[in-house]
Amino acid sequence: MTNYRSELDGIRGISIIAVILYHLDLSTFHFSNGYLGVDVFLVLSGYLISRNIIRELKETGKIDLGLFFEKRSRRILPLLITLSIVCQVLFFFYLLPNQFIDLAKSSISALTLTSNFYWVNEFSEYSAVGAAFRPLLHTWSLSLEEQFYITAPFFFILAFKFFKKNIFKPLIVITIFSFILYSIFSLNEWGGDMAFYLFPFRIWQFSIGALAAHLEFRRYESNSKLLQRPTLVLFSFAALVSTLFLGQFTSYNEVTDRLIVTITSFTVIAFSSKTNFIGIVLNVKPLTYLGLISYSIYVWHYPLFFFARIKESFSSPLEKISILGASILISVISYYFIENLFRKRTTLNRNTTYSILAIGFFISVTLSTVVIINKGYPQRFGDFHYNFEEMEKEQERYWEANSKFTDFNFEDQSRLKVAVIGNSFALDIATAIKENKKKAQVYFEGRTPHHCHSITKPGLPEFDPIECTSNIPLFTKNYSQFDVVVIADNHSFLDIGNTEAVDELKKNINRLRKAGFKGAIVLVGFRPEWNKTPFEIALDYGAMDEGVNRFAAPELIYSAPQIRELDDNAKEVYTISGVYYYDLVDAVCEENFCPIIKDRKILYSDKYHFSLAGAQYFSNHLVEFLYKINEQYKKN
């Protein structure tokens, strides 16, 4: 009986292709059953581990547990520890505090072989959109395999002791029992998550692999060819491939599909050989090579796909092919310089291996623990904080600091002198000007309630206009010492074409002129408004990176093109009133989306107002516009 069956690497190759195609999430052809490639891995692990244990028990009557667990540690842990450390270092620069804490916790769970328990509690729906934004979610299946490695030797020791060498009966019993348990839980909403993630509900897949190993020994010992079934292998292989890759056409339900994949994997493993047709197909070099490096590919591709998403480089087919190529390249390097290095006992002896693994484990767990203790290092993101309580405290400090403009110096002729009139929306504008201290100085005057669109007229009829008209004194002050007066509020599309609002604006301009102001008057245009706070959007996205900006686009109350259309209409209406119109959208939006994050800082404090980082973001654009308008007005 041969120790190495190269066709099994071919099966691994097919499985990893299915998993990758599923995670690529191709729009043209969605491989909806590709995730079942993991189930093939489980059956393969059941076969290979059981095969080694059964051989050792038959030959020696015992199992060298020290050697067994050493081999498993060499196989799994070096790459897993490397992944944990790399992810924590890399994503330090991108993940929001809450997500960074989740990464740290999931890293500890992966290294302690409990990742599947962690994810069943923290994030149940593996196929959900949010799954793509959890870089270590895929380690749940590695924990499943590790739990099998821990329990398998003891199961076979007991099976050989009580059933001698006929272990078929206990394997059948445990397979049937586990499958029934899986089916009951999987078909009920309350148990589906446990059935997916937890080991007791997946034992049947490992034990079916073990049955394949048992049948192989039976065939070898009886020197029988009766168990070779090339036609059965051919049909099973066809069913396996079609279920994995054509799931959108051939899928039944999750339980049935998983059963088909498990049974057909068993058949191909148990009955294929290098000499039959399927064995020859599975021995194709590119396929077997993918199988050889499949563990590295599985470990690295998922966090790399996640990284591409948060860097906004995972949309087009070319981008996906590029990141896939990078994943394979890194996997090849990983295979030769990590996997192979640790698997060869001639290169690293047991003591050296365990020492390196212990150091790596300590570093990784320490990094994770420090992240958790420090609450995800929220200070990485400047004025952005990781929960609403902190955001509110920050905003209180923002209002307190920026509602006081007490350092105005009328004697300074080197800087543009700007007066800003309006409500809290105007405070954002005043803050943006204030942030450009070298070029401008600003005075803020505002008591206008938020519903007083166009400064003095209510945008909605249910509001009392008396409260809005009480703001008229803002326009009767003498602003003659200023170069520019800026009017800013949250005027909405309701004001466009509202002749009453336009008339009131004209009256306010006349009041400014009568009070002595002779400079340029600027009306600030529309700003992006959101269905959710950008903070919540960033949390949904799962990372503090500019990749969130396109992700946020659907949460705009009006899309970027719609806002521009509103702005164009407003500009035509309001410029007739004798004011210059500042197009804020041009300053803060791209062609098809409006960023909520720049340089890892969030630009909005709520659905409508800018944060300090947001005010800083358009500060130069605004001040340069005001300089230009001031010069233009003087010439006229």
Image: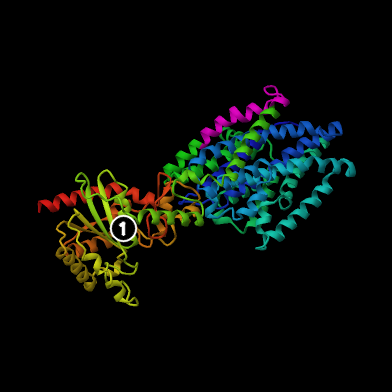
Figure check: 71 above or below 511 = above
Q: Which residue is drawn at 54% across and 42% down?
A: 303
57 up-or-down from 525: above or below: above
Q: In which quarter of the image is the C terminus?
A: bottom left
Residue at the farthest left position: 636
Verify whether residue 633 appears in magenta: no
Secondary-structure class at tag 1: helix
The answer, for residue 228, to whether it is visible in the render is: no
Residue 327 spot, x, y in % from top left: 52, 37
Q: Total number of numbered labels? A: 1
Q: Is residue 56 left or right of residue 255?
A: right
Q: Residue 534: percent from the left, percent from the top?
A: 43, 55
Residue positioned 73% across, 26% down in the render: 350
Q: Which of 218 and 412 is in front in this view?
A: 412
On whether residue 337 falls in the magenta region, the answer is yes
133 or 481, which is in the foreground?
481
Q: Is residue 222 left or right of residue 605?
A: right
Residue 356 x %, y %: 66, 28
Residue underneath mark 1:
561
Find the magenta span and give its range: 327-352
Disc 1 residue type (three-letter): Pro
Nearer to us in this view, 174 or 623: 623
Q: Residue at x 27, y 55 (%)?
A: 443
Image spot of residue 531 (x, y percent): 42, 62
In the rendered image, which quarter contains the N terminus? top right
Is residue 456 something one can see in this rendering? yes
Q: Is the magenta stretch mostly helix, strand or loop?
A: helix
